[in-house]
Amino acid sequence: MKSKRVVLGLSGGVDSSVAAHLLKKEGYEVISIFMKNWHNEDVTISNECPWLEDSYDAVMVSQKLGIPFQTVDLSKEYKERIVDYMFDEYSRGRTPNPDVLCNREIKFDLFLDIALSLGADFIATGHYCQKKQIQKGNETIFQLFEGNDTNKDQSYFLCQLNQYQLKKALFPIGHLKKDEVRKIAKSEGFVTAEKKDSQGLCFIGKVKLPDFLKQKLKPFKGDVIQIPDSLDTFKSHNLKNLNNLEFDESMSVPYQYNLNDGKKVGVHHGAHYYTIGQRKGLAIGGTKNPLFVIGTDVEENIIYVGEGNLHPGLYRKALRVSLDQIHWIREDLSLIEGQTMAVEARIRYRQPLSKAKLLQKKDYLYVFFDEPQSAVTPGQFVAWYIKKELIGSGTILE
């Protein structure tokens, strides 16, 4: 019987190296592809060229395994689908997640198309997550679960995948712990065995975000306003968010600050450079505890800050997702208007899951958390789970 063909995204890291080894060991016909996603002269992402070293390491691993290797240039599509989107979102005072988008738009879309054109039965990646399947009547439903290594679980980054993409995907290392992966790489003599995990943008590397943004979003001075945690209207708004009321939709709308709510404590160089919960980069002293960004106004070019990581302006119990931004991996579990669902949810990578309730209304999906969440950030993704299975996600509206 002919072996199933798998096209693997070989990134030059230890995870994809071991994924390739395990696939070959299981009898798959493995083809490795390195994705080159950036060499644009209009925007400099990094002074370093990590992709060059990564591509060399990927070649070494593929040669060691005796599997075909090739490079594909997706930099044009990456700029259009990821980088341009990032600039647009930041210009509107929102904080995008390029890693989630990279998986949805590049790895499990463009890369999948390339793989299928090569006659692949599946694509594979080195993500720490697990795929399973169940039968519902005559329908096969594919499931996405957290990785077995809770410290490395990457299911959140795949929260925008659909059933077809999952059907075609394999995650060979999802059942392993990171130290087990490195042990396998070392025993196989891979040059990637001790290589540090990549940092920064998906497939590109570490990025100094302010320097990156300044290339398209020009700096201009604005006021930094410190909000006291004793402000009456502000305090009442947040106390409402911290009580046990359920399904009060106004809880999902953040407090709208104004200049009269606080005092000027400094200047900044562009509200679009800052995100909710940010501490570094303010360069303002004179407070007992660090200042955190609790609100931004890109129209008026103002940022609002609060002192300390317990400032009530950092916390909210609810958020909402626009109807057109709701995504169900498990379409069979999707809600209709008026329905609710008990879930666990997270609003960023590596954040512990928190108990929450979903409420579907006509225009929005509301997410109500049992406990207040710190730094709910517009433009990021909220992902919801049931018993460690990722079933849906959506872009946080505000």
Image (cartoon, grey):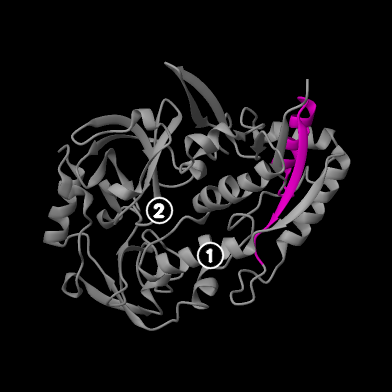
Q: Which residue is mark 2?
A: 380
In the image, what residue type sits under mark 1? Glu
Report how far apart the C-alphas of labels 2 and 1 lie in the structure.
19 Å
In the image, what residue type sits under mark 2? Gln
Q: How many marks?
A: 2
Q: Position of residue 286 (x, y in %)?
A: 36, 72
Relative to 117, is 225 on the left or the right?
left
Residue 328 can be seen, yes or no: yes
Relative to 27, is 200 on the left or the right?
left
Question: Which quadrant of the figure contains the C terminus?
Answer: bottom left
Q: Position of residue 220 (x, y in %)?
A: 39, 83
User: Does the magenta portion include 18?
Assistant: yes
* For marks 2 and 1 on the same chain, the one whose residue lies earlier in the sequence: 1
Report helix, strand or loop for mark 1.
helix
Relative to 353, is 340 on the left or the right?
left
Check the image and report above or below for 34 versus 48: above
Q: Give me the residue at 27% from left, 30% from top.
A: 341
Question: Which quadrant of the figure contains the N terminus?
Answer: top right
Check the image and report above or below for 234 versus 121: below
Q: Give me the residue at 55% from left, 48% from top.
A: 103
Quadrant in which residue 190 is drawn:
top right
Q: Give me the residue at 38% from left, 32% from top.
A: 331
* Residue extending furthest toward the bottom: 220
Q: Nearer the viewer, residue 22 or 205?
A: 22
Viewer-nearest of labels 2 and 1? 1
User: What range is drawn magenta here?
Assistant: 11-38
* Residue extending furthest toward the top: 137
Report helix, strand or loop for mark 2.
loop
Relative to 356, is 12 on the left or the right?
right
Q: Which residue is mark 1?
A: 80
Q: Residues within 10 Å of mark 1 (few under 14, many from 20)?
A: few
